[in-house]
Image (tube, grey):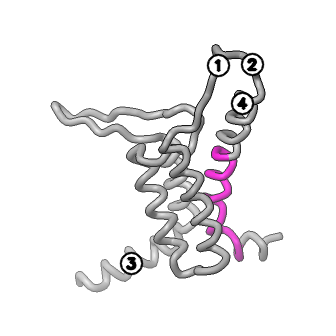
Amino acid sequence: MKQLYKKHKQLIPLIILSFFTIWILIRFIENTLSRDTDTYFILNRNNYYALIAIALGYISYYLIRKAYKYILIGMMVLGLFNIINFTVFEMSTTLSFNSHSIIFQPLSLAVGLITLAINLDKVGDLLSVSEEKQE
């Protein structure tokens, strides 16, 4: 089990985002089959972009492994700034500094932090190499 985790630990952020996009599809199918017009849900452009990004993530993970990390970073950045939406409802949080405000999606931030925690050893190696170069 530990070998399987080590081999596929880079896939964990994509799996987490996949659960949320599956929730989008389930919600869409439920509302398509339902006759209740009060809770009508329709997929928007940002949801379609998220579905495409998830598909590209899996394709790149299994076929083009070198491109996976760049696609994952791109998904995180696009999701962070609400360009793609991995959830049914657009969840966003505003962070304000004086007259400037940044609107971001907390789910993408959380998945980005999980990705950072998974790759903490690589980040530590990268930081130690950059510190050695400064000296």
Q: Is residue 135 above or below residue 109?
A: below
Q: Amino acid at mark 4?
A: Thr
Query: Circle 1 sits on which residue?
Result: 39
**Crowd class of label 4 (few under 14; some 14 to 19; many from 20; radius 10 Å):** some
Image height check: is 32 above or below 24?
above
Residue at 64% across / 80% down in the picture?
A: 63
Separation of disc 1 and disc 3 at Cα?
Answer: 52 Å
Residue that badge 2 annotates: 35
> Distance of mark 2 from mark 4, alpha carbons?
8 Å
Image coordinates for residue 74, horizontal then vertical, percent:
44, 62
Please state the extent of the stretch shown in magenta in the rendering: 6-21
Judge whether residue 36 is colored magenta: no
Q: CA distance from mark 2 to mark 1?
A: 9 Å
Residue 128: image tag: 3
| Crowding near the residue tagged with mark 1, few <14, some 14–19, many ≥20 C-alpha atoms within 10 Å | few
**Which mark identifies residue 2?**
none
Circle 3 sits in a helix, a strand or a loop, which is it? helix
Q: Locate residue 77 relative to residue 31 in the image: left or right.
A: left
Amino acid type, callout 3:
Ser
Across and down, in percent, residue 48 comes to 55, 48
Q: Amino acid at mark 2?
A: Arg
The image quadrant where one finds the N terminus is bottom right
Is 133 left or right of 20, judged from the image as shown?
left
